[in-house]
Image (tube, rainbow, N blue to C red):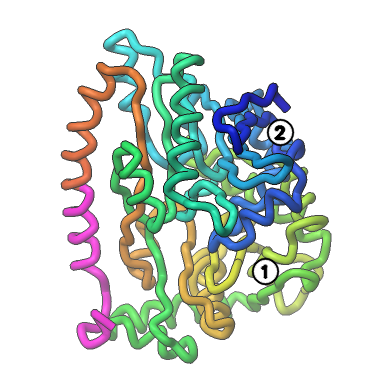
């Protein structure tokens, strides 16, 4: 833990280089009430202790904590980044502009759950504290740090939409993006979900699921203590194989140890969709990896060592949706990318990243650019959602 510096009579700020330096119970008292699972102590600690989000990989943990006496009352998972990989928000053009005008874009200060393009990032603030006041205090601490360390900018990615206006009041600029999100429209079963679509797409989905059955595969959903320990390292192998297949589009950010540690300390949030050959059920032929918290489901990774027709669609979309309906899940974020998802009930849904630049020239150049890009992004969202294979009678439900 770095040296503690008093910033107000009743508060102390400390910059933490390992989340393990913060007691788990203190951190999770702030993180557990949130809708997202990706800011909980075990998830973030797994990323660091497994060798995934570490300085050698370009992720230097630099977490901000606020204390009153010995009580943790606010925290922000933050990282100093020397590149933009693993963020899924593509600001490399900003880095190129910075290079051309002679400004060092890196390192930058980044707030997100590493390698996790899922909405929900925000400052962790204890119940009963004034959120706006505490956010202002933390922003001032960040400003001071970035000024002293000559950091070009501070960026929060995939922010909680309820937190966005708070940050805007404190001078951050919103950059609009979109994800592909499934919403439960009070479906009672999978057939209800199919009524969303026009007749052609309903036939297509049924055909894709039938194609998996014809290959003697049976998909099984496993959660928490139901999951055999052996499936966690196997999931890493599927994940690594998928990354290798996609070359530059798939990067192995997570280590095998990360997956193995999930069994020990985080399997209560894990959902595996495993595809077993009905003639040999010793080991899945393919598998998808999701996490759940409350009424939300998040798709993370998937893989299969064989090219099995339509298995990806069933393991990553249809079977998780079927399970989500049974569990009364309201929102399913299947992960980054949208080419396949928009035809399977995942409309474009806006999300935002929030930005502040500390170099005057970057501010003058990039802030007007962001406003122009936001207008184009909003138009793209509208165009995507006007061309979905939905049953006209189901739209607007």
Q: Secondary structure at mark 1?
A: strand
Residue 248 numbered tag: none
The answer to whether residue 85 shows anywhere in this view is yes
Q: How far across and down, in percent of the image, does residue 99 sit?
A: 33, 13
| Sequence-first disc among 2 and 1 | 2
> 10 Å neighbourhood of mark 1: few (<14), some, or many (≥20)?
many
Query: Image check: 179 left or right of 242?
Result: left
Q: How far across and down, in percent of the image, does residue 143 sit?
A: 44, 26
Q: Label 2, on which residue?
A: 18
C-alpha separation, residue under disc 2 versus residue under disc 1: 34 Å
Quadrant position of the C terminus in the picture: bottom left
Q: Which range is magenta?
A: 377-397
Query: Image check: 1 left or right of 86?
Result: right
Question: Is residue 381 found inside the magenta-colored segment of the image?
Answer: yes
Q: Secondary structure at mark 2?
A: loop
Above or below 167: residue 282: below
Residue 274 numbered tag: 1
Q: How far across and down, in percent of the image, does residue 260 sit?
A: 78, 50
* Residue found 22% across the figure and 45% down from its top: 374
Q: Quadrant of residue 218?
A: bottom right
Q: How far across and down, in percent of the image, does residue 320 sit?
A: 55, 73
Q: Quadrant of residue 224?
A: bottom right
* Residue found 40% across the figure and 26% down from its top: 153
Relative depth, front residue between 199 and 141: 141
Query: Image check: 242 left or right of 178?
Result: right
Query: Seen from this angle, which residue lies furthest front?
Result: 9
Above or below 115: residue 3: above
Question: Is residue 207 found inside the magenta-colored segment of the image?
Answer: no
Judged by depth in the image, the label closer to the viewer, 2 or 1, is: 2
């Amino acid at each position: 833990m770095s040296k503690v510096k008093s910033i107000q009579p009743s508060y102390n700020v400390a910059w933490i280089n390992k989340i393990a330096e913060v007691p788990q119970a203190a951190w999770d008292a702030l993180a557990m009430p949130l809708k997202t699972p990706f800011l909980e102590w075990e998830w973030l600690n797994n990323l660091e202790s497994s060798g995934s989000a570490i300085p050698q990989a370009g992720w230097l943990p630099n977490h901000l904590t606020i204390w009153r006496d010995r009580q943790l009352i606010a925290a922000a998972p933050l990282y100093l980044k020397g590149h933009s990989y693993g963020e899924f928000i593509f600001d490399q053009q900003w880095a190129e502009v910075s290079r051309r005008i002679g400004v060092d874009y890196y390192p930058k200060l980044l707030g997100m759950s590493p390698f996790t393009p899922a909405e929900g990032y925000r400052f962790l603030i204890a119940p009963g504290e004034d959120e706006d006041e505490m956010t202002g205090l933390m922003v001032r601490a960040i400003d001071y740090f970035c000024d002293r360390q000559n950091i070009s900018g501070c960026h929060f990615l995939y922010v909680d939409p309820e937190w966005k206006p708070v940050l805007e009041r404190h001078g951050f600029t919103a950059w609009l993006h979109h994800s592909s999100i499934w919403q439960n429209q009070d479906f009672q079963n999978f057939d209800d979900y199919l009524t969303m679509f026009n007749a052609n797409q309903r036939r297509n989905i049924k055909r894709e699921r039938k194609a998996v059955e014809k290959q003697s595969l049976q998909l099984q959903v496993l959660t928490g203590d139901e999951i055999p320990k052996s499936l966690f390292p196997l999931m890493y192998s599927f994940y690594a194989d998928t990354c290798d297949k996609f070359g530059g589009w798939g990067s192995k950010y997570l280590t095998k140890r990360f997956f193995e540690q999930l069994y020990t300390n985080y399997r209560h949030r894990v959902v595996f969709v495993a595809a077993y050959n009905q003639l040999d059920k010793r080991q899945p032929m393919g598998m998808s990896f999701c996490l759940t918290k409350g009424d939300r489901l998040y798709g993370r990774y998937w893989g299969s060592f064989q090219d099995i027709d339509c298995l990806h669609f069933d393991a990553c979309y249809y079977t998780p949706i079927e399970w989500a309906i049974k569990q009364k899940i309201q929102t399913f974020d299947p992960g980054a990318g949208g080419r396949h998802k928009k035809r399977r009930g995942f409309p474009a849904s806006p999300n935002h990243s929030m930005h502040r630049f500390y170099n005057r020239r970057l501010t003058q150049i990039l802030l007007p650019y962001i406003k122009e890009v936001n207008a184009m992004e909003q138009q793209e969202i509208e165009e995507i959602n006007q061309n979905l294979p939905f049953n006209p009678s189901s739209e607007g439900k």
